[in-house]
């Protein structure tokens, strides 16, 4: 089944043109920040992912998610977390949202294996376009959004908390954008942007399907998360929206266990009829 990676991967690369958007390049950026008395706890698969893996994937010789943490690390981490320099179990969502504000995503029981089903509520997001020709495309878009969130570029000079995840959307037509959820206390009346490169958008409720991962991976390894997600959805006859793919980032890239999610939208989802 996973021989489809070669075909699916080409489509994914053409669509995303990531250019390293999901990770920092170079060991100098990895695991450098120290936190006093921090002890890393290795989560189970279920704790980290929120779903069971498909047995067909586990039995396929091309499957590479059955790794041992740290076995491929060839760089020494400045803060001693050497096992987190390669693929590792993603940080559990409950642990992340106990430290940071998260939107009230509803995590549902999935119809099949290999993916988690999530309802993203309707809400306001601060958004900036990603220039894929820039040296650090997503990073530069994030900096622009920060200008709004810090109060420097909104009409109230209002500082706002950091909310995760940071969502990077890549569209089939070549567009890309970065969005961050506006904190709950400002959702009913968000400050207006005074920066022409940051806009406030009301995103409709959506159903998405996700696969999280942890660690620093090459582009093709990351692309495989989308391939696995599409294969898992096909097993239960779900056809996701082919026009957009999303990378949702939850964690600080220079410290600790990572969580990044490959995300696809359900194009047939109707929030009104599904909630009726």
Image (spheres, grey):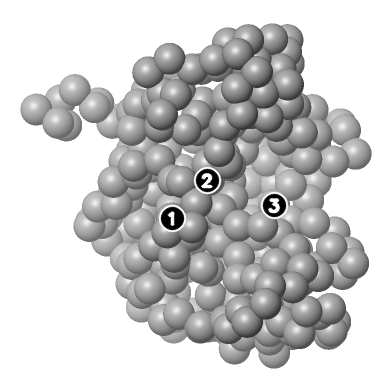
Look at 85% across and 41% down and name the residue there.
136
Q: Position of residue 122 (x, y in %)?
A: 35, 26
- Per the model, the C-alpha gap separating discs 2 and 1 is 8 Å
Whether 90 is drawn above or below 72: the answer is: above
- In the picture, the disc for residue 97 is 1
- In the picture, the disc for residue 164 is 2
Q: Earlier in the sequence, mark 2 or mark 3?
A: 3
Look at 67% across and 23% down and name the residue there.
151
Question: Regarding mark 2 in the picture, which secondary structure is present there?
Answer: loop
Look at 71% across and 59% down and name the residue there.
253
- How crowded is the residue under tag 1: few (<14 C-alpha within 10 Å), some, or many (20+)? some
- In the picture, the disc for residue 22 is 3
- How crowded is the residue under tag 3: few (<14 C-alpha within 10 Å), some, or many (20+)? many
Question: Regarding mark 3 in the picture, which secondary structure is present there?
Answer: loop
The answer to whether residue 86 is left or right of residue 242 is: right
Question: Regarding mark 1 in the picture, which secondary structure is present there?
Answer: helix
Instruction: Identify the residue at the far left of this view.
Output: 276
Report how many numbered discs are placed on residues in the image: 3
Q: Position of residue 186 (x, y in %)?
A: 44, 24
- Per the model, the C-alpha gap separating discs 2 and 3 is 15 Å
Q: Can residue 193 be seen here?
A: no
Q: Are marks 1 and 3 in contact (CB under 8 Å)?
A: no
């Amino acid at each position: 089944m996973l021989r489809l990676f070669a075909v699916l991967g080409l489509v994914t690369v053409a669509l995303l043109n990531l250019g390293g958007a999901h990770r920092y390049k170079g060991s100098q950026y990895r695991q450098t920040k120290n936190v006093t008395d921090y002890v890393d706890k290795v989560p189970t698969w279920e704790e980290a992912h929120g779903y069971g893996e498909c047995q067909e994937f586990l039995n396929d010789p091309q499957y590479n998610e059955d790794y041992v943490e740290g076995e491929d690390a060839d760089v020494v981490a400045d803060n001693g977390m050497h096992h987190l320099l390669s693929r590792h179990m993603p940080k559990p969502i409950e642990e992340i949202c106990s430290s940071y504000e998260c939107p009230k995503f509803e995590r549902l029981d999935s119809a099949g294996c290999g993916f988690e089903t999530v309802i993203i509520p309707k809400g306001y997001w601060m958004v900036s376009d990603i220039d894929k020709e820039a040296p650090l495309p997503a990073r530069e878009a994030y900096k622009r959004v920060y200008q709004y969130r810090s109060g420097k570029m909104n009409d109230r000079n209002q500082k706002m908390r950091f909310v995760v995840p940071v969502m990077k959307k890549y569209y089939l037509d070549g567009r890309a954008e970065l969005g961050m959820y506006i904190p709950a206390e400002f959702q009913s009346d968000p400050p207006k942007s005074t920066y022409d490169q940051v806009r406030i958008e009301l995103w409709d409720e959506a159903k998405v399907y996700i696969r999280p991962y942890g660690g620093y991976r090459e582009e093709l390894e990351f692309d495989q998360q989308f391939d696995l997600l599409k294969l898992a959805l096909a097993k239960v006859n779900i056809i996701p929206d082919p026009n957009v793919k999303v990378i949702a980032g939850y964690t600080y890239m220079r410290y600790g266990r990572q969580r990044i999610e490959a995300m696809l939208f359900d194009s047939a989802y109707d929030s009104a009829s599904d909630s009726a």
